[in-house]
Amino acid sequence: MKFLDQCKIYIRSGDGGGGAVSFRREKFIEYGGPDGGDGGRGGDVWIEAVEGLNTLIDYRYQ
């Protein structure tokens, strides 16, 4: 028995975050400047096929 499901899947990976706000502080440097981070690369999206699966109803509310 074969079934064919068709659906629209909306996915979005991570954006890596906003980074860190931080300033350099050393004893004899009056204006140290920023030393915070830029955030990460963001996430990846993986799709994995399952051979024995014949319906997409399990993923309806995820």
Image: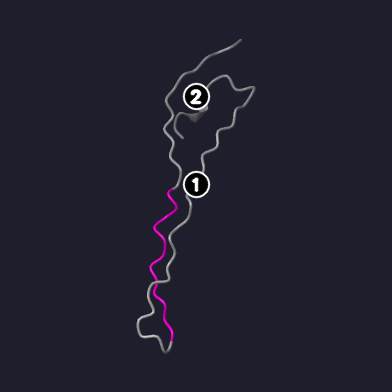
Q: In this view, does 58 lie to the left or right of 29?
A: right
Give the crowd class for mark 2: few <14, some 14-19, many >=20 residues within 10 Å: few
**Magenta part of the chain:** 15-26
State the residue at coordinates (42%, 49%): 15
Q: Is residue 21 magenta?
A: yes
Which residue is nearer to you in this view: 39 or 61? 39
Task: Determine whether the residue tagged by mark 2 lies in a helix, strand or loop.
Answer: helix
For badge 2, the amino acid type reads: Ile
Task: Determine whether the residue tagged by mark 1 lies in a helix, strand or loop.
Answer: loop
The reply to whether callout 2 and callout 1 are in contact (CB within 8 Å) is no
Which residue is nearer to you in this view: 27 or 16? 27
Which residue is nearer to you in this view: 40 or 55? 40
Displayed quadrant of residue 52: top right
For badge 1, the amino acid type reads: Gly
* First-in-chain label (2 vs 1): 1
**Applied colour scheme:** one colour
Q: Is residue 7 above or below residue 10?
A: above
Q: Name the residue under label 2.
A: 57
Instruction: Name the outermost residue toward the left.
Output: 31
Q: Is residue 30 above or below residue 36?
A: below
Residue 62 screen position, x and y as percent: 46, 35
Q: Main secondary structure of the magenta part?
A: loop
The quadrant of the picture occupied by the N terminus is top right
